[in-house]
Image: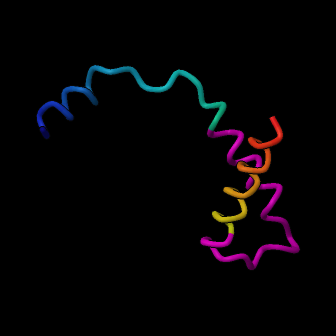
Amino acid sequence: YPRLFRMAMDYLPAQASSVPAERVFSSSAKTDTQRRNRLSPHLMEQLQMLKFMLRKSRL
């Protein structure tokens, strides 16, 4: 359904807030420090997922 997809992208509203994205960048900035600047992208992603899961389980 490529035509329907293009119509949806044209008419449906985008997310109104950038807060979730800002939280991700803020969290990754705390992980990617001067001491940890050699982490691979894969390991960085895994650490971010672990942080998210730990926070979610505490709620």
**Residue placed at 11% from the left, 34% from the top?**
3
**Residue placed at 76% from the left, 54% from the top?**
51
Give percent across and percent down for residue 6.
19, 33
Check residue 32 for magenta coloring: yes
**Residue placed at 13% from the left, 40% from the top?**
2
Q: Is residue 40 above or below residue 26?
A: below
Check residue 4 for magenta coloring: no
Give percent across and percent down for residue 56.
74, 41
**Residue sitting farthest toward the right:** 35
Question: How would you classify the magenta stretch by its main secondary structure?
Answer: helix
Q: Is 13 on the left or on the right of 10, as rendered?
A: right
Q: Is residue 2 above or below residue 9?
A: below
Give percent across and percent down for residue 59.
80, 34
Magenta span of residues: 21-43
Q: Is 6 on the left or on the right of 38, as rendered?
A: left
Give percent across and percent down for residue 28.
73, 55
Q: Quadrant of the N terminus?
A: top left
